[in-house]
């Protein structure tokens, strides 16, 4: 199966790096494509903002949106409780660091969250961002100009 186009609301399997880990290697997990934009280092490339999907509820310093059973089903996720964290994200270049989801050879995506769920996540993320309560981990940083 070919690599999908990066689209808002798509859940992909990405090597997400949590802010607590710094720039250490990430753990592959489902991640929401929350924004698509020209890569600041090279406008011919596509930049992505990934928000992690977690089975662990957000801690006291974090914020997350619980996914409904309908949203998880639509996106191809399992039925266990899950949250999209809106207090941190990874900025990366498409398609760096994505992989096949477990037991889905040849696929790179789980599916799409419903538009209403994506809108709720965007509003929560934007609120955190405007309040300066959102943390980025920039992956594949641009090479410095000398």
Image (tube, rainbow, N blue to C red):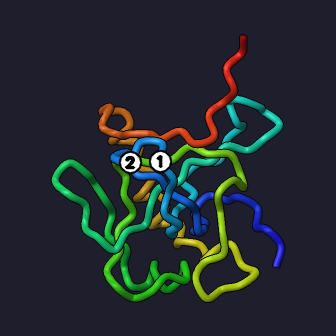
x 71%, y 15%: residue: 145
Q: Quadrant of the C terminus?
A: top right
Classify residue 75 as left or right of residue 82.
right
Classify residue 7 as left or right of residue 135.
right
| The disc label shown at residue 122, or none | none
Answer above or below: position of 51 versus 109: above
Most extreme residue toward the front is 24
x 39%, y 63%: residue: 84
Answer above or below: position of 126 versus 54: above
Q: Which residue is mark 2?
A: 21
**Helix, strand or loop under label 2:** helix
**Label 2: how many Cα within 10 Å (few below 14, some 14–19, many 20+):** few
Residue 65 at x, y = what percent?
Answer: 33, 63
Q: Quadrant of the N terminus?
A: bottom right
x 38%, y 45%: residue: 19
Q: Which residue is mark 1?
A: 24
Quarter where residue 78 is shown: bottom left
Answer above or below: position of 128 versus 107: above
**Helix, strand or loop under label 1:** loop
Most extreme residue toward the left is 60
Residue 3 at x, y = what percent?
Answer: 79, 68
Quarter where residue 7 is shown: bottom right
Residue 109 at x, y = what percent?
Answer: 65, 73
Residue 39 at x, y = what percent?
Answer: 70, 36
- C-alpha distance separating marks 2 and 1: 6 Å
Most extreme residue toward the top is 146
32 or 19: which is nearer to us?
19
Looking at the image, do the residues carrying marks 2 and 1 touch, with CB atoms under 8 Å apart? yes
x 52%, y 63%: residue: 31
Classify residue 49 as left or right of residue 59.
right
29 or 114: which is nearer to us?
29
67 or 29: which is nearer to us?
29
């Amino acid at each position: 199966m070919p690599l999908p186009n990066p689209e808002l609301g798509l859940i992909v399997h990405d090597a997400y790096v949590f802010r607590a880990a710094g720039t250490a290697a990430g753990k592959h997990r489902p991640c929401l494509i929350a924004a698509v934009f020209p890569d600041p280092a090279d406008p011919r490339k596509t930049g992505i903002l990934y928000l992690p999907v977690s089975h662990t509820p957000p801690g006291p310093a974090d914020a997350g949106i619980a996914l409904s059973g309908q949203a998880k089903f639509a996106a191809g996720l399992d039925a266990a409780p899950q949250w999209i964290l809106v207090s941190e994200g990874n900025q990366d270049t498409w398609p760096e660091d994505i992989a096949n989801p477990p037991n889905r050879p040849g696929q790179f995506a789980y599916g799409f969250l419903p538009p209403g769920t994506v809108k709720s996540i965007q509003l929560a993320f934007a609120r955190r961002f405007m309040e300066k309560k959102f943390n980025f981990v920039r992956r594949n940083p641009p090479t410095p100009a000398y």
